Amino acid sequence: VTWCNYVSSATIGSLCGKGLDMDALRDMSAQVMENSTRPPDRLFVEALVLRVMESVGEQMLQCPERLSYLLFHTFQEAGGLYDLGVGTNFTIDMDKLHDGLVQMNLHTNPYTRCKMPNGKFELGLNFDDINESGIQCRQEVTKTFKEPASMMVVVDFLLCYRVPIMLKLYCLTISGYIYLGSSQG
């Protein structure tokens, strides 16, 4: 639901704005939020499809946005969330589900380039890249984030941990103030 809401609120020029019907996304999100009009057996089947995707995908559980993207397409290929009264076949494409894991198996170092099976020299993938490919509605998983190198690692560390660092500095300042005011300093 949150993936559908997030993607449907994207601007037209974003990666998600290309190739996806925003009205279909909003409609699917509304249907999932309001389940009172949908039959319970259909809800069970949808939950079962998700569980099968999670079980078969194993490591893809680390990438919920990519799973949501693939689940949306699985439902769309099966005719959406509407119960048409006839049997519905849900097809899970294993190649799409495991896209990225094969690339991770070949090359995971995000700082060096390696020749991949597609013939391109690419940086190594990680789960963040796979997940981000789902957020950006990419058909195939690609490298989406360039990790910081050299001095930028320090800057990135300070930006990510600025709140705990400031709390420790405040505690150090207060403890120093108390120590100096206790006539022992």
Image (spheres, rainbow, N blue to C red):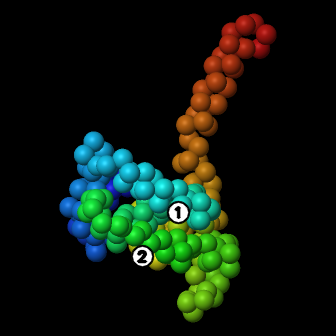
Q: x, y (%) of residue 107?
A: 67, 77
Taking depth in this image into account, of 77 and 87 the one nearest to the observer is 87
**Dot 2: within a 10 Å radius of its alpha carbon, few (fewer than 14), some, or many (20 or more) residues?**
few
The count of marks equals 2
Q: Vertically, is 57 above or below 180?
A: below
Residue 115 position (above or below residue 102): below
Crowd around label 1: few <14 · some 14–19 · many ≥20 (10 Å): many
Does residue 150 appear anywhere in the picture?
Answer: yes
The residue labelled by disc 2 is 139
Residue 77: image location, x then y, percent: 34, 72
Looking at the image, residue 122 sits to the left or right of residue 24; the answer is right
Q: Position of residue 37 (x, y in %)?
A: 25, 46
Say which residue appears at 30% left-offset and 66% top-offset: 86
Q: Which residue type carries mark 2? A: Gln
Q: Is residue 8 visible?
A: no
- Dot 2 or dot 1: first in sequence order is 1
Query: Which residue is painted at 77% across and 14% down in the image?
Result: 185
Quadrant housing residue 78: bottom left
Residue 147: % across, % down: 58, 65
Question: Outermost residue toward the left?
Answer: 23
Query: Mark 1 falls on what kind of element?
Result: helix
Residue type, mark 1 in image: Met
**Residue located farthest toward the front when viewing the structure as drawn:** 86
Residue shown at 79% from the left, 10% from the top: 184
Q: Which of the numbered marks, if any, corresponds to residue 53?
A: 1
Q: Point out the residue furthest to the bottom here.
A: 119
The secondary element bearing badge 2 is classed as loop
Please tell me whether residue 172 is drawn above or below residue 103 in the rendered image: above
